[in-house]
């Protein structure tokens, strides 16, 4: 870096950025421990249900007592009858099961099948666990604000967008994932169960960023001095944060789907794993959320690739050169397109589509990190 470039970097702001990022990591760690405690103490609700079931059926096994209690609950679930007029005269009465949760009432709209059974959440209905969960959300919010301050200070220190190398890109991308999570929470969506795996990924990403990917704040190479840096790289960053949330949801869907099938076949044996799966949202809800996230992000990823091609033409004189980064960006796009197509195809719904979503996100990680670190190309701006 030449002397003029060095003088244009505000070292005080760069230092403040580093302090804020490390502070955010410390608060994220506290949030991670609080989410872990919520899942741990939330398991006590299942113990309480088992105790109540055994008290109602003295001498019965735990499995038998719990099965009878759940069957009684299903029988007691409110129903609603709807009369539908037939075209040729007469009426048909349809019975629907009402599923009430958190003040909201849903009526099953397909046949007479029961609604998907939603888990009680990470807290499992336990008051202390719920308090820990709310503390975790507060800590997550504080950490996100600290991280936002760190990202902004980093950009101000060099007078440019704060995603000019892999360190900055990772800090910004993990922030996007956290802000998406908080946005869903504060908009009323019950997604606190996502907090624990999200914090694990954010801490891992930031840990790698500050140790293996760190680069001092400095000016960019001439090829990156363009307004397209705001458009193209920010698009990739936002996609990465959102797709990570979608990948977590797909992974949890696979686990929950296996558990629901095993429970329907009577193969569940209880224990910690069953307790965790019981508190997770239904497989149908996880599948729907994962699909919605990926479907919304896919057009943005398409735009990001197109914007990159336009920028490449203005910078290098070619729209597309099959550079490793361009190639893997296209591979990622193809796999996500296959996922969306599979999700709409009867024979590929469910676990197969979820596995495709995980493969697609793996391709994104290879594109963003593997290619940038291990393969040289015209996009080698990792700063390492």
Image (cartoon, rainbow, N blue to C red):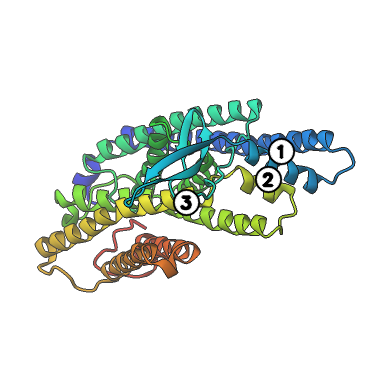
Label 1 and label 3: CA atoms lie apart by 31 Å
Label 1 and label 2: CA atoms lie apart by 7 Å
Q: Are marks 1 and 3 in contact (CB under 8 Å)?
A: no
- At 49% from the left and 27% from the top, the residue drawn is 103
Q: Are marks 3 and 2 in contact (CB under 8 Å)?
A: no
Secondary structure state at the residue bearing disc 2:
helix
Which of the two labelled residues, at mark 3 and mark 2, occupies the earlier sequence position? 3
- In the image, 378 versus 229, the foreground residue is 229
Which quarter of the rendering shows the C terminus? bottom left
| Residue 331 x/y as whole percent | 32, 69
Quarter of the rendering containing residue 85? top left
Quarter of the rendering containing residue 159? top left
Tag in front: 3 or 2: 3
- For label 3, the residue is 111
Label 3 and label 2: CA atoms lie apart by 30 Å
- Estimate how packed mark 1 is, as few (under 14), some (14 to 19) or many (20 or more) residues with alpha carbons within 10 Å: many
Can residue 215 be seen from the camera position used here? no
- Estimate how packed mark 3 is, as few (under 14), some (14 to 19) or many (20 or more) residues with alpha carbons within 10 Å: few
- Estimate how packed mark 2 is, as few (under 14), some (14 to 19) or many (20 or more) residues with alpha carbons within 10 Å: some
Quarter of the rendering containing residue 141? top left
Q: Is residue 191 left or right of residue 226?
A: right
Can residue 308 be seen from the camera position used here? yes
Secondary structure state at the residue bearing disc 1:
helix
- For label 2, the residue is 275
Which of the two labelled residues, at mark 1 and mark 3, occupies the earlier sequence position? 1
User: Up-down: is 112 above or below 98?
Assistant: below
Q: Is residue 376 left or right of residue 264?
A: left
Tag in front: 1 or 3: 3
- At 23% from the left and 74% from the top, the residue drawn is 322
| Residue 125 x/y as whole percent | 63, 31
């Amino acid at each position: 870096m030449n002397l003029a470039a060095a003088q244009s970097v505000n070292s005080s702001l760069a230092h403040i950025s580093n302090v804020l990022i490390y502070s955010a990591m410390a608060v994220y760690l506290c949030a991670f421990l609080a989410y872990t405690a919520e899942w741990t103490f939330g398991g006590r609700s299942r113990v309480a249900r088992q105790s109540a079931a055994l008290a109602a059926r003295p001498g019965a096994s735990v499995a038998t007592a719990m099965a009878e209690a759940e069957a009684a609950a299903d029988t007691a679930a409110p129903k609603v009858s709807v009369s539908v007029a037939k075209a040729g005269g007469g009426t048909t009465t349809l019975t629907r099961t009402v599923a009430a949760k958190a003040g909201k009432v849903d009526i099953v709209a397909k046949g007479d099948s029961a609604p998907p059974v939603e888990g009680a959440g990470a807290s499992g209905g336990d008051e202390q666990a719920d308090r820990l969960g709310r503390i975790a959300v507060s800590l997550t919010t504080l950490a996100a604000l600290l991280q936002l301050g760190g990202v902004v200070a980093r950009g101000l220190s060099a007078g440019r967008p704060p995603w000019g190398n892999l360190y900055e890109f990772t800090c910004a991308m993990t922030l996007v994932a956290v802000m998406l999570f908080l946005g869903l929470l504060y908009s009323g969506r019950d997604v606190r169960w996502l907090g624990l795996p999200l914090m694990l990924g954010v801490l891992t990403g930031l840990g790698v960023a500050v140790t293996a990917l760190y680069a001092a704040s400095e000016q960019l190479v001439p090829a990156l001095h363009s307004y397209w840096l705001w458009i193209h790289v920010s698009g990739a960053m936002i996609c990465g944060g959102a797709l990570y949330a979608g990948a977590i949801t797909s992974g949890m869907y696979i686990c929950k789907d296996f558990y629901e099938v095993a429970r329907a076949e009577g193969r569940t044996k209880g224990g910690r794993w069953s307790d965790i799966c019981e508190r997770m949202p239904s497989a149908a809800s996880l599948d729907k959320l994962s699909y919605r996230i990926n479907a919304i992000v896919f057009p943005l990823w398409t735009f990001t690739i197109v914007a990159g091609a336009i920028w490449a033409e203005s910078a290098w004189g070619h729209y597309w050169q099959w550079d490793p980064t361009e190639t893997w960006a296209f591979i990622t796009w193809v796999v996500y397109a296959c996922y969306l197509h599979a999700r709409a195809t009867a024979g590929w719904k469910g676990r197969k589509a979820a596995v495709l979503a995980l493969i697609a996100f793996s391709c994104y990680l290879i594109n963003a990190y593997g290619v940038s670190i291990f393969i040289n190309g015209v996009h080698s701006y990792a700063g390492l």
